[in-house]
Image: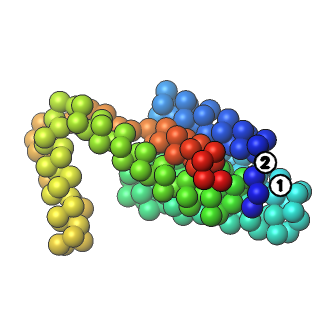
Amino acid sequence: MELTIATKLFVTAMLVVAAVIDGVERRVPNWLTFPVILAGLIFGAWNNGLSGFGLAFAGALAGLFTLIVPYALNGMGAGDVKMMAAMGAWIGPMLTLKAFVVSAMVGGVIGLTMILCQKHARETLHRLYLSFVNLMLYRDLAVAVPEGYVSSTKLPYGIPIAIGSIATLFLLA
């Protein structure tokens, strides 16, 4: 799927708007994601007929399925999932999967930085270690949270999605 500069700029604008809203309101609104998904499907069909619609639909599904498991585990909001689906409708499934990988790396770096900068960094890193060990040994992510422990920050995942996806659009597409 060949992307024009206009398509890249449109998707970039959508991602930036979604990331800003997510950073401020901690949600990605439906009024943004649903019209972008629909427009991507129409755009694909308009430009390449049924095969274009099929690629746009496959891209939306790729975006949806990349984040559906973290969403189901309460690791992120539904808006983040719909944001990836909206982007996927415009850029196709293969580039969406690349954007997901880059976004996950960006999210990991930002998340680790946030952990290291918080008050309870040592306890949080220890809990992450215990979660990993439990997952590997028992296939269970449940780890007891110490009494009085409160996680002070949550990462609005729309921001790493935007950063990773924009980098993918302009460096890997």
- Total labels: the figure holds 2
Left or right side of 112 for 89: right
Count residues near mark 2 (Cα–Cα under 10 Å), then give few for <14, some for 14-19, many for 20+.
few
Task: Measuring from the top left, give residue 3's x and y in whole percent.
Answer: 75, 52
Q: Label 1 sits on what residue type?
A: Ile
Left or right side of 61 for 135: left
Residue 122 vertical position relative to residue 53 in the rendered view, above or below: above
Residue projecting furthest to the front: 171
**Mark 2 highlights which residue?**
4
The label nearer to you, 1 versus 2, is 2
Q: Looking at the image, can residue 123 be seen?
A: yes
Q: What residue is at 81 percent from the left and 58 percent from the top?
A: 44
* First reached walking from the N terminus: tag 1 or tag 2: 2
Residue projecting furthest to the left: 147
Image quadrant where residue 107 sits: top left
Mark 1 lies on a secondary structure that is helix
**Mark 1 highlights which residue?**
42
Q: Label 2 sits on what residue type?
A: Thr
Q: CA distance from mark 1 to mark 2?
A: 16 Å
Q: What residue is at 52 percent from the left and 45 percent from the top?
A: 164
Q: Looking at the image, can residue 31 be seen?
A: no
**Applied colour scheme:** rainbow
Task: Measuring from the top left, give residue 142's x and y in whole percent.
Answer: 21, 60
Q: What residue is at 30 percent from the left and 37 percent from the top?
A: 113
Q: What residue is at 48 percent from the left and 57 percent from the top?
A: 101
Task: Measuring from the top left, give residue 47's x and y in whole percent.
Answer: 88, 57
Number of the label disc, if any, that sits on residue 144: none
